[in-house]
Image: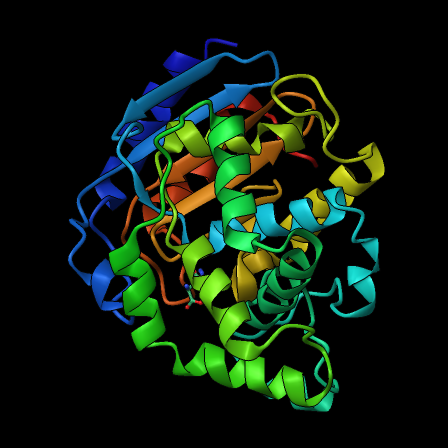
Amino acid sequence: MDYQAVLEEVAAFAKPLVGRGQVADYIPALAGVDINQFGMAVADVDGGVYGIGDWERPFSVQSISKAFSLALVLAEGGGKIWERVGTEPSGNPFNSLVQLEYENGIPRNPFINAGALVVTDRLQTLTGDASTTMLEFLRAESGNPEVSFDPAVAASETEHGDRNAALAHFMASYGNLDNPVPTVLEHYFWQCSIEMSCRDLARAGSFLARHGLRADGSRLLPRREAKQVNAVMLTCGTYDAAGDFAYRVGLPGKSGVGGGIVAVIPGRCALCVWSPGLDTRGNSVAGVAALDHFTTLTGWSVF
Ligand code: DON
């Protein structure tokens, strides 16, 4: 596959959509990002990396971190996490509170905020420092030792974090958090604040394309658990737009309100696309279109 030629065609296709939508403004530190940016990278299972546009510019990973925290909990032997969080799409916005009461403090899946808070809580218990564990993993897998937290984004999220605090306290009232709420929130916000480029994220996500094998060839996850993470990404990774994403793109994918999306083609490669303009459900407008066109051009989807 001539990845570079495909990326050029995809970027040309997505170009008219760059600048559409809105940047996330509910976290003030993200509101100032230039909407007119677009980058895309492919990292194949053999270590080759290809990119186009703003593919080397760091952006806020936000909820893409939720896929890595789930993988890290499973890697630490935390499979019991599935007693505390489900595997069903929520059909609700990522920060919704409504289902939690009906469902006794058990979040529908690990990729809505409530679920990610439970996963972060578990990672904190297993490692003693959830956010540093994630940062170190992302540095190693991306091959970029400069991957860092953005303290301004973390502070901004803390300051505007009432909704996440409400979710965490609510789950604590059901006994579904082991650590104090402020500890869980702190690590969750730091994880979301990590800055990475498309290049870094495509490389960091490629263990999911290698069925659980890390960049150095060691095994992070058994094949079955890599399959499970990919499956939950497919069904829940883009929130209440997961059905539309599966219909258009046909790949496991995880989006973030920074405008990035990581997608996985098992056995072949991981992709990351970034463009900050979001649709009403919090997914990058140009990013989803680019992935749609990528799978159309290559014929590579899981379907
Ligand atoms: O919890 C929040 O509000 C953010 N830090 C992460 C949200 C996010 O990226 C949801 N994604 N689309």
Where residue 47 sits in the image (x, y, percent)? 54, 13
Q: Is 130 rendered above or below residue 293?
A: below
Taking the view exactly as shown, the residue that stands out farthest to the front is 128
Q: How many marks?
A: 0
Q: Residue at left 54%, top 22%? A: 298
Q: Residue at left 61%, top 40%? A: 251
* Foreground pick, 292 / 207: 207
Q: Is 23 rendered above or below residue 99?
A: above
Q: Quadrant of residue 286?
A: top left
Residue 22 visible to the viewer? no
Colouring scheme applied when the structure was drawn: rainbow
Q: Quadrant of residue 22?
A: bottom left
Q: Quadrant of the C terminus?
A: top right
* Foreground pick, 189 / 28: 189
Where residue 236 sits in the image (x, y, percent)? 63, 58
Ligand 1 falls in which quarter? Answer: bottom left
Residue 200 visible to the viewer? yes
Q: Is 106 rendered above or below residue 75?
A: below
Q: Residue at left 67%, top 75%? A: 177
Q: On the rendered structure, is 106 left or right of 287? A: right
Where residue 165 sits in the image (x, y, percent)? 48, 81
Taking the view exactly as shown, the residue that stands out farthest to the top is 2
Q: Residue at left 17%, top 44%? A: 36
Where residue 103 sits in the image (x, y, percent)? 74, 85
* Foreground pick, 16 / 230: 230
